[in-house]
């Protein structure tokens, strides 16, 4: 085979290889499976049993500065629940319900009277986080961690919310995770 034919064959094979690689990449992005790809354990600083089943998932993050929110519902069976509760004991950020008033406004909405003014907070759109009396919750104020000088400012008086919230309903064995970045 002449040199020119070998060079032509090389470029044809290179072109095919690049097309296949791009196709695989596109398919991988197109068929990204959030149910298995998101590291929920890292998000809430608590190990989640590997066999727990993700029932619902929504993520609107993207665009400029990555603003958006993430919502997930994870179902545990009895053994997974017990394992998860043991993992929670290692993390001081988990507390028994009811939620703190300021956090309740962010999650469920409501009214706040402050300095003679009424402020109305809308509930989370399209997300069903139950108001449970028999539960435990996790709250991480990532805004205060990134801006320590703002840590003492009331969370509802800040210019932005960067929070991670999780609620584990002890009656239904469901874990609700909500992450908000504004």
Image: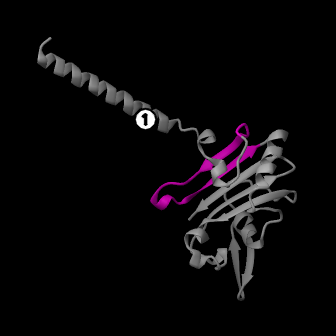
- The extreme front residue here reads 90
Find residue 78 and report its horizontal and vertical position in percent. 85, 40
- Residue 136 found in image quarter: bottom right
Within 10 Å of disc 1 (Cα), the crowding (few <14, some 14-19, many 20+) is few
**Is residue 25 rendered to the left or right of residue 51?**
left
Vertical side of 157 occupied by 80: above or below? above
In the image, which residues are magenta? 50-75
Q: Nearer the viewer, residue 103 or 60?
A: 103
Residue 108 in sight from this viewpoint:
yes
In the picture shown, does residue 80 fall above or below 122? above
Residue in view at x 68 percent, y 44 percent: 56
Residue matched to label 1:
25
Instruction: Name the residue: 15% across, 16% down.
Output: 5
- 19 vs 182: above or below: above
Residue 123 visible in the picture: no
Q: Position of residue 10 (x, y in %)?
A: 22, 22
Residue 37 appears left or right of 18: right
Magenta highlight on residue 41? no
What residue is at 83 percent from the left and 39 percent from the top?
79
- Residue at the far top: name it: 1
Give the position of the N terminus as an image quadrant. Answer: top left
Q: Is residue 134 left or right of residue 5?
A: right
Instruction: Give the quarter of the image for residue 126.
Output: bottom right
């Amino acid at each position: 085979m002449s040199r020119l034919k070998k060079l032509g064959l090389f470029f044809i094979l290179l072109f095919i290889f690049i097309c296949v690689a791009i196709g695989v990449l596109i398919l991988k992005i197109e068929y990204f499976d959030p149910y298995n790809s998101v590291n929920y354990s890292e998000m809430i600083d608590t190990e989640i049993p590997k066999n727990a089943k993700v029932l619902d998932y929504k993520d609107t993050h993207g665009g400029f500065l990555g603003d958006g929110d993430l919502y997930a519902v994870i179902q545990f069976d009895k053994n997974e629940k017990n394992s998860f509760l043991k993992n929670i004991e290692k993390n001081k950020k988990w507390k028994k319900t009811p939620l703190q008033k300021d956090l309740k406004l962010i999650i469920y909405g409501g009214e706040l009277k402050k300095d003679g003014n009424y402020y109305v907070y809308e509930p989370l759109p399209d997300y069903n986080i139950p108001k449970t009396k028999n539960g435990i919750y996790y709250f991480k104020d990532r805004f205060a961690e990134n801006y320590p000088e703002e840590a003492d400012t009331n969370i509802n008086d800040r210019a932005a919310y960067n929070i991670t919230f999780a609620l584990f309903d002890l009656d239904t064995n469901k874990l609700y995770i909500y992450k908000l970045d504004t």
